[in-house]
Image: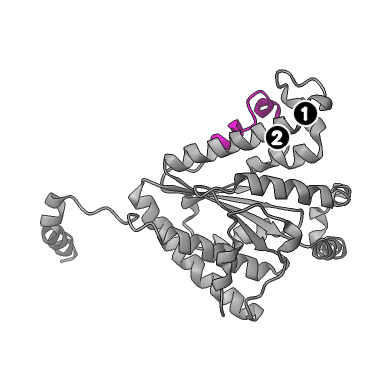
Amino acid sequence: MDISKISSFKIDAPVKLSDRGTYEDFGASNKQLKEKYKDIRKDLGDLQDTLYAHGKYSVLVCLQGMDTAGKDSLIREVFKDFNVRGVVVHSFKVPTELELKHDYLWRHYIALPAKGKFGVFNRTHYENVLVTRVHPEFILDQNIPGIHSVADIDQQFWDRRFDQINDFEKHIADTGTIVFKFFLHLSKEEQRQRLLRRLHLKRKNWKFSPGDLKERKLWDRYQKCYEEAISNTSKPHAPWYIIPADNKKAARVSVASILWEELSKYKNIKEPELAPDIQADLNHYIKTLQAEKQ
């Protein structure tokens, strides 16, 4: 299995989504793909233990994608071998009354992972330049000074939001949060098939909402908003990766592999050494415990 092409998933220039593929299998069978991400997730689980012991970095994994892109199942599979206390998942829904009383980044800032932990944002602060851009009337709920109607929301408003998001990510990166942003790039036809499966399979019915079809009609608008958001906010300290998502198992391999390869570059993440006085008395502690057995 050749996964070398995942290096091309990283975005370092303006992007056009129609030029990027939505399907990948790395020339492997479903069984091979599953075995691959199972191996990597064990390594990631071990790395998280070391990250916790080291205590100076946290990791933020941001997942975005159209409905049915596979975010939930990816989280379940990629992070399955983590210590449950080492990873915290936040799924951001419609802002609450309390959240609307703060600036739009507040609820994301307070959900950031503590040092030593992984945090996963299932939908992220980018909803504030995606959903709200497709539905600008939602901005009015935020009670922003100077914004009285949709007519007040111009291109400069969105440019400022991109700058604010870049500043937010630069700040957390500078203070020890390693940021990954993944866009699960799904084709419109694959989404249609997955929505049909939700309707045909009784155990999947609960996932379906008529609103899914309403948002699907806005597909092209969402694609344009994603292009602009990704192009304006993929930075060295917080890069975007566009992951082909029509094949869920290959998408999991891609995300897990990128996390592993990038985090492995941090050679300073290692278990702390014992204090010299404890190290010098290790044999004494061993003999004390062994004597108890006698």
| Residue at screen point 80% across, 65% down | 190
Magenta highlight on residue 253: no
Residue 111 visible? The answer is no
Residue type, mark 1 in image: Ile
| Residue at screen point 63% across, 61% down | 74
Residue 254 visible? The answer is yes
Check whether the beta carbons of the residues at disc 1 and disc 2 lie within 8 A of each other.
yes
| Residue at screen point 65% across, 81% down | 29
- Is 185 placed left or right of 221 in the picture? left
Mark 1, secondary structure of its residue? loop
Local crowd size for mark 2, using a 10 Å CA cut-off: few (<14), some (14–19), many (≥20): some
Residue 115 is situated, as x and y percent measured from the top left of the image, at 42, 44
Residue type, mark 2 in image: Trp
Identify whether 125 is placed above or below 182: above
Q: Residue furthest front?
A: 13
Residue 28 is situated, as x and y percent measured from the top left of the image, at 63, 80
The range drawn in magenta is 96-110
Q: Which mark is residue 158?
A: 2
Q: Report the quarter where the N terminus lies.
A: bottom right
- Is 287 placed left or right of 60 in the picture? left
- Is 210 placed left or right of 152 in the picture? right
| Residue at screen point 82% across, 31% down | 137
Nearer the observer, 31 or 221: 221
Local crowd size for mark 1, using a 10 Å CA cut-off: few (<14), some (14–19), many (≥20): some
Give the Cα distance between marks 1 and 2.
8 Å
Q: Looking at the image, how many numbered discs can be counted on the residues?
A: 2
Q: Report the quarter where the C terminus lies.
A: bottom left
- Is 43 placed left or right of 125 in the picture? left
Would you name the residue on which mark 1 appears?
153
Identify whether 129 is placed above or below 235: above
